[in-house]
Image (spheres, helix red, strand yellow):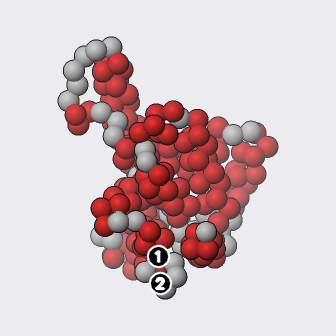
Amino acid sequence: DELIARLFSSLESGYNKNPYHNSVHGADVMYTVNSFIQASSKMKEELDAPDLFAALVAAAAHDYKHDGVNNAFHINTSSDLALRYNDISVLESMHAAELFFMCKEEGKNIFSVLDAGQKKEARRIITASILGTDMTKHFNHIADFQGRLDAERDLAEGHEIPENQKIDKYHMIEMPLHCADISNPAKDIAIYQKWCVVVMREFF
């Protein structure tokens, strides 16, 4: 419990005081991902405790150290971040990397309770899920996931489908995080309006 508390305290303080991409947004997305988990019998049945843990950590850290501008700005200005990550998912790559750098600090390695295989799996889930929040990949992700849903429907009807067309645990975690990240319009109008105000303030 103490290790977890240190982790989330560090995550909270590591979020910048942006109008939108701040620690409240990180907490909101983690809460929303957890809501998806609680509502999904498939996720609860097919994901084990370390997988669910990785999903929640990825959600909490998905915008860690966000600087308030977008990938296009970094790429167009040839920022240090854009150069470091070769103009590919610049901010998302940074968020994931910074989380793991933070976990290397003394007393913050939340993966120390996992065995080697679980650590590798958690890193894969977290990295893929955070990279999946890159909006430039949105329509490809939607098309891919829809194809997998259609294949799962065929499977339920007794048809054979290739293994690589099934919804595996990575898609099962990546898509809820992506949805949670842009879920404000799906929430109560009073909540949605508050997020609209701050995201417009940050963009302008």
Using the rendered image of the protein, determine whether residue 133 is visible from the camera's viewpoint: no
Residue 109 bears which disc, if any? 1
**Disc 1/disc 2 C-alpha distance (Å):** 7 Å
The answer to whether any part of residue 195 appears in the image is yes
Picture coordinates of residue 174 (x, y %)?
A: 43, 48
Question: Callout 2, which amino acid?
Answer: Glu
Q: Residue at x 79, y 43 (%)?
A: 190
Q: As rendered, which of 201 and 130 lies closer to the eye?
A: 130
What crowding class fits label 1: few (fewer than 14 Cα within 10 Å), some (14-19), or many (20 or more)? some
51 w.r.t. 103: above or below: above
**Residue 137's spot in the image, x, y percent?**
38, 48
Q: Position of residue 132 (x, y in %)?
A: 41, 52
Q: Among all residues in the image, which is located at the extreme top? A: 157
- Measuring 21% from the left and 21% from the top, which residue is drawn there? 160
Where is 112 relative to 39, above or below?
below
Q: Residue furthest bottom?
A: 106
Q: Secondary structure at mark 1?
A: loop
Q: Is residue 44 left or right of residue 6?
A: left
**Quadrant of the image containing the C terminus:** bottom right
Residue 184, labelled with which disc? none
Q: Write the residue at 25% across / 16% down.
A: 159
Q: Position of residue 105 (x, y in %)?
A: 47, 84
Classify residue 127 as left or right of residue 192.
left
Between 93 and 59, the residue placed more toward the observer is 59
Please name the amino acid that badge 1 sits on.
Asn
- Say which quarter of the image contains residue 152: top left
Residue named by callout 2 = 105
Residue 1: image quadrant is bottom right
